[in-house]
Image (cartoon, rainbow, N blue to C red):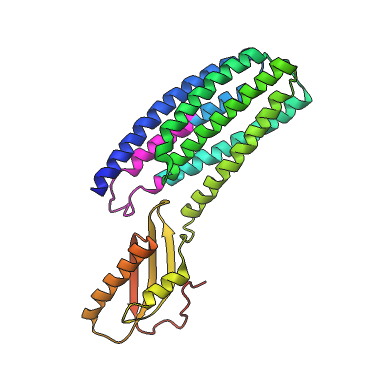
């Protein structure tokens, strides 16, 4: 049943991403034309941002398709990290784009130009509604999936960006303050940098096989409370994606027959899965073989 549910979720996610990509591409084209006609840097920035997000969503869409492929002799872990790679590429691209837009806004402060506030507001309003709809389409799929969440954050940042451009257009129309346009671009860029940096950092942690978020002291206590277990040490944990945690480690046992170890292994596996959320464990049984008994060997 779990495999079936997962397939259904993936199909639903792919369908929604397709709809969001088409909608976002249309909005990007409208904003680009509107930015050129109105002379608005923030509107042009938002259009470039949206074009970048369209590419990001297509990347996420492709990653969802690849991640659904089964395991093979060469890919024994499957293709789960395709989504992590997509999340990293999407977030890194958005970071670079945000820095570029921030620099362009600084230049516009130095050389302000006339902006058509009415046209700017009209185009921004269209973008705001379309981006909000896209965000809602992806929101339910964003929890527990870094790849979809990176696309969701792209859409959410687009919504905030379009709203900022809309507010900027109103300020220019009402009070004739053209410096609001680059200011909005700078604020939107800073917001996007803050949101995407968290995804970049988490994706890098997974790709570098950093330790999973496991309470090692509790894990040690739980395993060593199993009858027959003397000590657990030299533990390594890592993630193939943001949901699947793997563990390997050494377990000292009291002197016993080999046939008795099966029951102990089952107990260890049960504790790891039910208490610590570890999907797969590789345990090396031994009897006082290692001099270093620390839970994590540095």
Q: How far across and down, in percent of the image, does residue 84 sit?
A: 44, 46
Nearer to the camera, 14 or 165: 165
Instruction: Magenta stretch: give its range.
Output: 54-82
Residue at position x 39%, y 85% in the image: 288
Image quadrant assignment for residue 226: bottom left
Q: How far across and down, in percent of the image, does residue 183 sit?
A: 70, 29
Q: How far across and down, in percent of the image, does residue 87 sit?
A: 47, 42
Image quadrant assignment for residue 227: bottom left
In the rendered structure, does residue 189 fall within the stretch colored magenta?
Answer: no
Extreme residue toward the left, this view: 259
Q: How many numbered marks, from 0 up?
A: 0
Q: How far across and down, in percent of the image, does residue 263 sit?
A: 24, 75
Residue at position x 37%, y 64% in the image: 275
Residue at position x 38%, y 55% in the image: 244
Q: Is residue 246 above or below residue 261?
A: above
Nearer to the camera, 184 or 92: 184
Q: Is residue 205 visible?
A: yes
Along the horizontal axis of the image, is 255 left or right of 221? left
Q: Is residue 225 above or below residue 56?
A: below
Nearer to the camera, 23 or 239: 23
Q: Is residue 100 visible?
A: no
């Amino acid at each position: 049943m779990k495999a079936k549910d997962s397939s259904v979720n993936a199909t639903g996610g792919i369908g929604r991403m397709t709809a969001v990509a088409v909608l976002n591409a249309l909005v990007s084209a409208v904003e680009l034309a509107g930015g050129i006609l109105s002379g608005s840097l923030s509107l042009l920035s938002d259009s470039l941002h949206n074009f970048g997000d369209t590419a990001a969503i297509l990347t996420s869409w492709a990653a969802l398709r690849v991640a659904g492929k089964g395991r093979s002799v060469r890919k024994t872990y499957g293709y789960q990290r395709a989504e992590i790679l997509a999340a990293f590429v999407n977030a890194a691209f958005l970071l670079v784009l945000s820095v570029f837009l921030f620099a362009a806004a600084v230049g516009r402060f130095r050389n302000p130009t006339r902006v058509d506030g009415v046209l700017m507001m009209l185009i921004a309003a269209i973008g705001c509604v379309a981006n909000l709809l896209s965000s809602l389409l992806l929101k339910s799929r964003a929890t527990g999936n870094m790849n979809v969440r990176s696309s969701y954050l792209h859409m959410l940042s687009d919504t905030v960006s379009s709203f900022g451009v809309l507010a900027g257009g109103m300020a220019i129309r009402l009070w004739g303050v053209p410096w609001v346009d680059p200011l909005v671009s700078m604020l939107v860029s800073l917001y996007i940098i803050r949101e995407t940096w968290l995804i970049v950092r988490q994706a890098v942690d997974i790709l570098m096989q950093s330790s999973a978020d496991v309470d090692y002291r509790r894990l040690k206590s739980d395993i060593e409370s199993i009858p027959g277990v003397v000590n657990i040490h030299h533990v390594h944990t890592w993630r193939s994606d943001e949901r699947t945690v793997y563990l390997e480690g050494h377990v000292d046992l009291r002197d016993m027959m080999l046939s008795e170890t099966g029951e102990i292994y089952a107990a260890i596996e049960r504790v790891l899965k039910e208490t610590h959320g570890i999907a797969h464990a590789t345990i090396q049984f031994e009897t006082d073989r290692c001099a270093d008994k620390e839970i994590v060997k540095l």
